[in-house]
Image: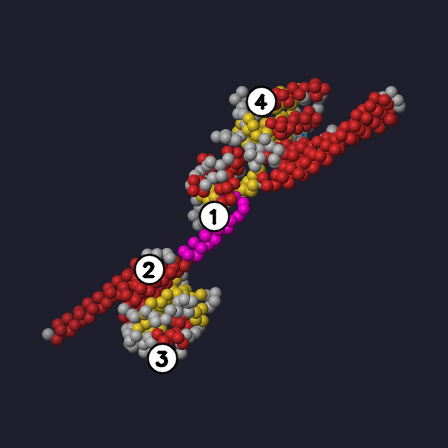
Amino acid sequence: MQDIESLLYQNRLLTEEVKRRIDQLAAINTVATSVSQSLDLNRTLKTALQAVLNVVGADAGGISLIDYEAQEVVLRAQHGWEHDFTNPPMRVAVSSGMSGRVIASDNVVLDNNLDGSEELAVPRFHDEHFRAIAMAPMHARGKIIGILSIMSKKTEAFDDEIITVLKAIADTVGVALDNARLYENSVEHEQRLDAILQSTADGIIATDHNGRIHLINHAAESMFDVSARKLIGMPLRESPIHPRVRDSLLFALSSDKGSSKAIKVSLDNDQVVALSVSPVYVESQVDHGKQTDGWVIVTQDLTYMREEEMARTEFIRAAAHDMRNPLGVTISSLNMLRDIVKDVADPANEVVGLALNGVNRLQDLINDVLNLEQIESGYDVNLSEVDIKDMIREIGAEVRPLLQERSLTFTTELPDDLPIPQVDRKWVRRAIVNYVDNAIKYTQSGGTITVRAFPNDMLLHIEVVDNGPGIPKEAQSRLFERFYRVTGSEKIRGTGLGLAIVKSVAEAHGGGVYVRSQKGKGSTFGITLLMAGAP
Ligand code: ADP
C-alpha cells in the first residue's frame, strides 16, 4: 500500500515536471515565434519584450544592447516602467551596476529582495519601486550582445523555473535582435551606396553577367533620356538607349572578357560621350564558373567640353591657316627660283631643292597636326551611311598616277554584300588614304597593294595589305604612337602622324586598329569600325 502511494506520488511529481518542461518549451517557442516576425530592429525589440513579459508573468522589463565601441550598455526598450529611460536611451558603462555583473559573470543576476539600499549605476532607477529583478545575458554569434531584464513590484517574484525560462529566452531574443541589427546595417549600407550612386555626376549602369541591366543612376537616365523603371531587368541589347552607345557597349562586353575598356562615342546631335566598361567580380564561396559577375559602365557626357575643344581647335586651325599662306608663298617662290636656277650652277639648284623639301615637310606636318587635333576633339564627326566599296574604288582611282610612277599593282577584295555602315565619310576616307599612302611609300616598285573589306560580328574591317619591307616585331607595338617612325624610314618623306590619325579615327567610331607584319614579308594594316544597328 505504502509502495503504491509512493509510486503514485512519484508519478505525480514526474507528470508535473514534464508539464513544467512542456510549459517552458512552449514559452520559449512563443517568444521565438513572435520575435522572428520582423527584421525591423525597433519592432523586434518591442515584440520581444512584450512576449517575454507575457510568458514569465513579470510586471516590467527592459532590453539593453551593448555598444562595444563606446563600452556602454544602452537601454533600447522598456515596458511597465514609470519613467521613460529610452528617450534619450539610458547608457551605463559596461563594468558598472548590476548589468556590469551580468556581463562579467556571463550569467543571470537575480535579486528577489530590492529594498532601495542597493548601489545602482542609475540612481533614478530607485524611483521605479521594483522589489525584484532578474537580468540575463543575451548571446549571438558567440558573444554577449545585450541584457534582458524582468522586474516585479513584489519581493521573491522570480523562482528557478522563471530564471531557467528567462535564460533560454534571452538567447532566442538575442539572435533575433542581432539578425535585425545586421539587416538594418546592410540596408543602411545599401542606402548609403545608392545615395552616392544617384548623386554622382557620371552616369552609371550595372549589368549582370548576361548583360541584363540591374542598376542605372539618375545621371545615366538623363544622359540617355531613358527611365530606370523601364530599363531595370532589360537586356542591354534590347534597351532603348542610343544605338551607337548600345552597340559600342555590347561590343565591349562581348570582346575580350575580363578587361576594362574606354570608348568615346560621337552621337548625331553633336553629343560626345565617353564610356568606360569594367568587369565586376563578386567574391563568392560558390564557384559558378563565370568569367565575370557583371559589368559596370561609367558614362561621361563630354559635350560640355565641346566649346573648349572648338576654341582650341579653332585656334590651331587659325594658326595653321596663318602659317599655310606664307608657306604657300615660300613654296611657290622656291619653285620659281628652282626654274630660274635650273640652268645655272649645280650648288644653287641643290640648295633650292633642300629648302623646298624642308617647307614641304613643314606643310605636311601642319596638315597632320591639324587633322589629329580635329579628330581627337571628337566633335567633328558626322555620321551618315557610307558605301565603303565605292570609297575604296575612288581612292584606288585617285592614287593611280602614283602607283604607275612606282610600278605598283593595286587590287581590291570587296564582297558584293558588304554592309553599309554609319560612319564619318571624311575621316574614314582619311584613314584608308593614310594606310594606302604608306603602302605606296614603303613598298618597293613592282609590289602589290590590296585593299579588302569584310564584316565580322558588329565590326566592319578594312585592311590594306602590301608585300613591302614589313616591320620588325619590336617596332609594331609603337607604330600608332604620334611621331613614331621605324628606324630606316628617315629617307622617306613622312611626319610620323599618319597612323596616329588612323587610330583616332577608329576610336571615334568605336573600333580599333591592328597590324600584322613580318620583316621582309609585307604588312597588313587594319581598321575596324563599329556598324551602328548591327545584329
Ligand atoms: P609616316 O609619316 O612616317 O609614314 P606613319 O604614322 O604613317 O608615319 O607611319 C609610322 C611608321 O610606320 C613609318 O615611319 C614606317 O616606318 C612604318 N610604316 C607604316 N606603314 C608601313 C608599311 N606599309 N610598310 C612598312 N612600314 C610602314
Q: Give the range drawn in magenta.
A: 183-205
Marks 1 and 2 close (CB-CB < 8 Å): no
Q: Name the residue under label 2.
A: 35
- Mark with earlier residue (4, 3): 3
Depth check, front residue: 200 or 139: 200
Q: Label 3 amino acid?
A: Gly
Where's residue 208, x and y in %? Answer: 45, 42
Question: Mark 1 or mark 4, which is nearer to you?
Answer: 4
Neighbour tally class for label 3: few under 14, some 14-19, many 20 plus, Cα within 10 Å: some
Label 4 sits on residue:
389
Nearer mark to the viewer, of 3 and 2: 3
What whole-number distance in Å separates the C-alpha atoms at marks 1 and 4?
46 Å
- The answer to which of marks 2 and 4 sits earlier in the sequence is 2
Q: Which residue lies furthest to the right in this view?
A: 345
Q: How far apart are marks 2 and 4 (CA)?
A: 74 Å
In 3D space, how far apart are the residues under numbered discs 4 and 3 (Cα atoms)? 101 Å
Indicate which disc, 1 or 4, sits on the residue closer to the N terminus: 1
Give the residue at mark 3: 116
Instruction: Give the CA distance from mark 3 to mark 2.
Output: 33 Å
